[in-house]
Amino acid sequence: MSDDLAKSSRASSARLARGVSPWLLPTAAAAAATALLTRRDRRWALAAVPLSALTGGMLWFFRDPDRTPGVGRVLSPADGVVQSIDPWPDGRTRVAIFMSPLNVHVNRAPLAGNVASVQHVAGGFLPAFNKDSDQNERVVWHFDTALGDIEMVQIAGAVARRIVPYLSAGAKVTQTERIGLIRLGSRVDLYLPEGISPAVSVGEKTVAGVTRIDRG
């Protein structure tokens, strides 16, 4: 087990992510109702079993464990796998993290600072691993930090069609604080300022709030 995964496994408790109620509550209610109806007519089991399984899956998908923060100027905003690392024309470096449906979907602040802006941008719903998914539905964050302006983009995928920001412009944020949720799988792009090299490599697993992204 890597150091980052070991730290994440020492979480003291787990909770459900904010913003899941519109999906979870109707499903759980339907599962409970059909389970009760099964006592009267066993044919209701045809609905109760898959609904109960779906409810259990949602409880897993929308888990939000506490984390022991890592050490670093820039920490990963997302659980997932580094999909690409690209130099940007303005001197920054983009680190793209792909989140599968099995990852935790709550994103965290990579640095402490202030939320300069939060912008929702309409777009498509291509699979997040597609090179053209940059044009998907997304939320663009800018943080005013000790390293200057830090941009982070939450990108919806083919399944994840809702992004739920927890903060708005002007909010003060601490490093590793929960800032938003992408329902189901998706991608998070983090732009490192010019002069800061990434400490991760393509294919490396990341843990939100734990994995160091910048090279010290």
Image (cartoon, helix red, strand yellow):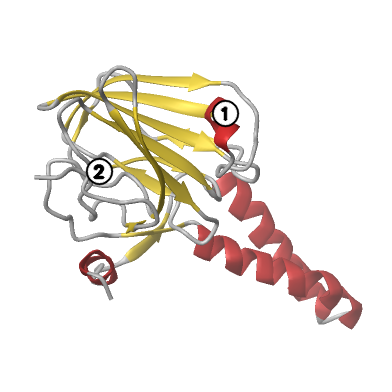
Q: Is residue 145 left or right of residue 125?
A: left
Q: Which image quarter holds the N terminus?
A: bottom left
Name the residue carrying label 1.
Answer: 137
Check disc 2 and give the amino acid type. Glu
In the rendered view, tell whether residue 124 sits above or below residue 29.
above
- Which one is closest to the eye, mark 1 or mark 2? 1
* Residue at the spot 58% in from the left edge and 21% down from the top edge: 122
> Label 1: few (<14), some or many (≥20) within 10 Å?
many
Q: Nearer the viewer, residue 81 or 115?
A: 81
**Residue 47 place in picture, x, y as percent:** 82, 69
The answer to whether residue 32 shows anywhere in this view is no
* Residue at the spot 28% in from the left edge and 47% down from the top edge: 76
**Residue 114 place in picture, x, y as percent:** 20, 24
Q: In this view, does 77 lie to the left or right of 71?
A: right
> Label 2: few (<14), some or many (≥20) within 10 Å?
some
Quarter of the image where one finds residue 179? top left
* Residue at the spot 54% in from the left edge and 46% down from the top edge: 183
Report the Cα–Cα distance between label 1 and label 2: 23 Å
Helix, strand or loop at disc 2?
loop
Name the residue carrying label 2.
Answer: 177
Q: Which is more N-terminal, label 2 or label 1?
A: 1
